[in-house]
Image: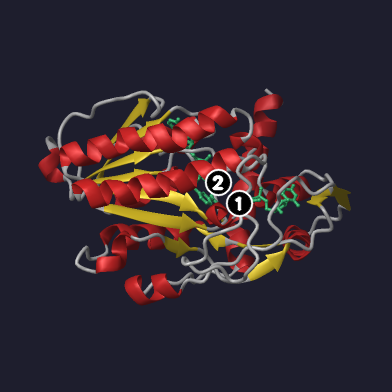
Amino acid sequence: MSGAQAYRRTVLIAGGAGFIGSNLSRRLLAQGDRVICIDNLETGRSANIEGLIPNPGFAFFLHDIVEPFTVKGPVDRIYNLACPASPPKYQRDPVHTLKTSFIGALNLLAIAEKKNARILQSSTSEVYGDPDISPQPESYRGLVNTVGPRACYDEGKRATETLFYESHRQTHVDVRIARIFNTYGPRMDPEDGRVVSNFVVQALTGQPLTIYGEGEQTRSFCYIEDMLDGLTSLMEADELEPTIFDPMNLGNPHEFTMLELADLVLHLTGAKVKREFHPLPKDDPLQRRPDITRAKTLLGWEPKVPLHDGLIPTIEYFREEIDMAQQRIGG
Ligand code: NAD
Ligand code: UDP
């Protein structure tokens, strides 16, 4: 096979070695796309893409999107998934997180304009901060602390939404903005620090589950396959729909407390470990649940996989990861 003509489209995925990006890479390759993955491996893992390297339709470039770059040949679609998503990871170098969000997106927008490609920005439910209404529709403007420990992520994503929106208005670049709510599934980093990976790894390794605060705060968890359906539907949605350029919530509207999540993980793993209470991190949102009316109406999309069902393959994945790590240590 030679040349780009053999492929349906050429898709650039920034952050393609991360959790969502590596799952998206697999999905698009299976659908006949050529995938160019750009990642600095800050939070992504080479293990996520190792299996893709022999595929002639997959190309990997180790690069930080904060630094300008060029891409040879045509590009039809760009997914910007590059940014650490776990609070302990994005707080490690907050200035770089802001640069990744804004300058990285600026560099990707320049490529989109040059190649006449459609570009999707992975924004976040964090643009709503610690919301005082529930569920959160896209029209809600949010309650965000500009100088709190989560601000580098929240404000970086908020500014980048503005950057995308204004770029569209000024240069007509074809943009999509997905406000992604908590997503989980296979290929999450076991050491990522987010709640699903923490609880499952703790349960499988016989450690107490670390519950922050009293565990009454809520999140709404979307299984990765549902999220991929949502992201690809938004990317391919008809640009004749005038509001398609506006931000769109993507997430599962079923809300759980962290205590409920802990109980479900204990039930599904059969682990007999304790729950251990730790202080609630500063500015940790107390509730989060998407209003997905817009996605339902414009894309005909809604999640299909309940938390219980999505946790089963996720637990299986973490079990295999832990077994492999133990085998490596055992020599
Ligand atoms: P992840 O940390 O697993 O993946 C992010 C990827 O981006 C990693 O491979 C990382 O190495 C790469 N990256 C980070 N900074 C980079 C840089 N400067 N240059 C090049 N590559 C860089 O996170 P994820 O869960 O896959 O999230 C993907 C995107 O979706 C992120 O933009 C995140 O903000 C957004 N999002 C995710 C969730 C979620 O629950 N998973 C929720 C809301 C938004
Ligand atoms: N959390 C928890 N124990 C953990 C990790 C997180 O109780 O080991 C809580 C955290 O305080 C938050 C929720 O789980 O209220 C979701 O945290 P996560 O880091 O997964 O995502 P985010 O806060 O960005 O939604």
The residue positioned 83% from the left and 44% from the top of the image is 207
Question: Is residue 200 in view from this perspective?
Answer: yes
Return the residue at label 2: 154
Q: Which amino acid, by three-letter code, is at mark 2? A: Asp
Point out residue 53 in the picture as x, y percentages from the top left corner: 35, 32
In the figure, residue 39 lies in which quadrant?
top left
Element carrying mark 1: loop
Judge whether 125 appears above or below 201 on screen: below
Question: Is residue 190 in view from this perspective?
Answer: no
In the figure, residue 105 lies in which quadrant?
top left
- Front residue (pair 274, 164): 164
The residue positioned 45% from the left and 72% from the top of the image is 302
* On-image quarter of the N terminus: top left
Crowdedness of circle 1 by 10 Å Cα count: few (<14), some, many (20+)? many
Point out residue 243 in the picture as x, y percentages from the top left corner: 30, 66
Q: Which amino acid, by three-letter code, is at mark 1? A: Val
Judge whether 85 appears above or below 181 on screen: above
Q: Quick check: marks 1 and 2 in contact, CB under 8 Å?
A: yes
Crowdedness of circle 2 by 10 Å Cα count: few (<14), some, many (20+)? many
Q: Which circle's residue, 1 or 2, is located before the other in the chain?
A: 1
Point out residue 177 in the picture as x, y percentages from the top left corner: 38, 55
* On-image quarter of the C terminus: top right
Q: Give left or right: position of 196 versus 170.
A: right
Return the residue at label 1: 144
The residue positioned 48% from the left and 39% from the top of the image is 18
In the figure, residue 5 lies in which quadrant?
top left
